[in-house]
Image (tube, helix red, strand yellow):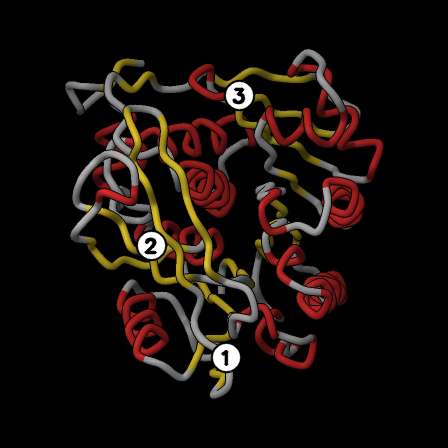
């Protein structure tokens, strides 16, 4: 197994019209969750991935598990809950570059996950454990899930990759979010923040100054997204390197770009690329996803990714 990831995926209803959600009359049903997005992105690039979660014993859960399994992701450690539903959320395309999301996930099956659901055999043997800051925001029991997954990873020599993925709507408070996120950053080998997330955690400053804040907490490697400018890479004790991005002429849907970035970075590391080369692959994956409506619909296979990075798409410039 290359990458194991743990977290909630929800049924996504995406309106077929642009504008305020109140005016939408028809929707497309899809599935989206940061952790499963990463697992699917890696699977499409030929890597072996496993997604651990809990679903409701309902039609949404049945459809979701079948979809993710169909993408080549191992779902053998996904459990079902007869008393709680699979989470749901809605997207709203108000206008260009203004996409909003509305969650209906309180008391969902995934939010009721406990540490007992994380088995050593699910983590052992993987190269990386991928986690995000969404999972601990769901409930106190989900925080214990994260702690156990990290403990098992460390015991089995599995590197921990953490994406803060700040979603303030689901945290009890900003103070709680900062405290918990810093706790998990301290436990991680590689951290994949966005510049805005770094500002939330450490205050406003120049992008190149943020990696040291993560290193002080304990993170060995920081690969930070800085929007259209690309990303910056920093390993503890080394210099901060800038990795240029890909300019997209027309952004259709930015949601999911960060997950694609994570998949690209992990794919690069699994392939033995340098940190900078892996970040470049992450930049490309993130750019590709923004050109398609949906979290996973724009995730490429390996041939398409190579073509894109070689300049094979007309509406993207290096």
Instruction: Mark 3: give few (<14), some (14-19) or many (20+) Cα within 10 Å.
Output: many
x then y, percent, for residue 271: 45, 44
Query: Foreground residue, 236 or 296?
Result: 296
Label 2 vs label 1, nearer the camera? 1
Sequence-wise, the earlier of marks 2 and 1 is 2
Give the side of residue 230 with respect to residue 204, left or right: left
What numbered label is drawn on residue 257?
A: none
The residue to which callout 3 is attached is: 226
Q: Where residue 84 is drawn, which disc sits there?
A: 1
**Which residue bears the numbered disc 2?**
46
The answer to whether mark 3 and mark 1 are in CB contact below 8 A is no
Residue 315 position, x and y percent, is 18, 19
Say few, some or many: other residues with alpha carbon within 10 Å of mark 1 (under 14 / 14 to 19 / 20 or more).
some
Residue 236 visible, this orientation: yes
Q: Which residue is at a point 73% across and 32% down the rendered structure image?
A: 201
SS of the residue under disc 3: loop
Asked which secondary structure carries label 1, the reply is: loop
- 317 is higher (above) or lower (below) than 282: above
Vertical side of 149 occupied by 287: above or below: above
Give the residue at the far front of this rendering.
22
């Amino acid at each position: 197994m290359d990458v194991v990831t743990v977290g909630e995926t929800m049924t996504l209803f995406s309106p077929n019209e642009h504008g305020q959600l109140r005016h939408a009359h028809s929707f497309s049903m899809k599935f989206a969750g940061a952790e499963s997005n990463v697992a699917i992105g890696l699977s499409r690039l030929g890597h072996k991935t496993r997604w651990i979660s809990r679903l409701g014993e309902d039609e949404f859960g049945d459809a979701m598990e079948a979809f993710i399994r169909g993408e080549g992701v191992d779902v053998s450690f996904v459990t079902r809950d007869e008393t709680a539903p699979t989470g749901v959320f809605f997207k709203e395309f108000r206008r260009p570059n203004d996409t909003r999301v509305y969650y209906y996930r309180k008391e969902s099956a995934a939010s009721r996950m406990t540490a007992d659901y994380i088995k050593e055999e699910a983590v052992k043997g993987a190269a990386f454990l991928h986690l995000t800051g969404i999972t601990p925001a769901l409930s106190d029991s989900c925080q214990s899930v994260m702690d156990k997954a990290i403990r098992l990873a460390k015991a089995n020599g599995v590197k921990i990759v953490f994406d803060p993925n700040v979603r303030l709507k689901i945290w009890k408070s900003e103070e709680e979010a900062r405290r918990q996120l810093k706790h998990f950053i301290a436990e991680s080998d590689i951290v994949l923040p966005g510049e805005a997330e770094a500002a939330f955690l450490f205050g406003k400053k120049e992008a190149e100054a943020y990696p040291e804040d993560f290193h002080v907490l304990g993170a060995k490697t920081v690969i930070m997204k800085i929007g259209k400018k690309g990303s910056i890479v920093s390993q503890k004790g080394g210099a901060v390197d800038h990795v240029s991005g890909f300019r997209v002429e027309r952004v259709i849907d930015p949601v999911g770009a960060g997950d694609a970035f994570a998949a690209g970075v992990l794919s690069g590391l699994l392939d033995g690329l340098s940190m900078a080369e892996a970040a470049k692959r992450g930049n490309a994956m993130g750019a590709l996803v923004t050109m398609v409506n949906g979290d996973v619909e724009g995730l490429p296979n390996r041939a398409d990714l190579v073509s894109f990075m070689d300049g094979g798409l007309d509406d993207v410039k290096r």
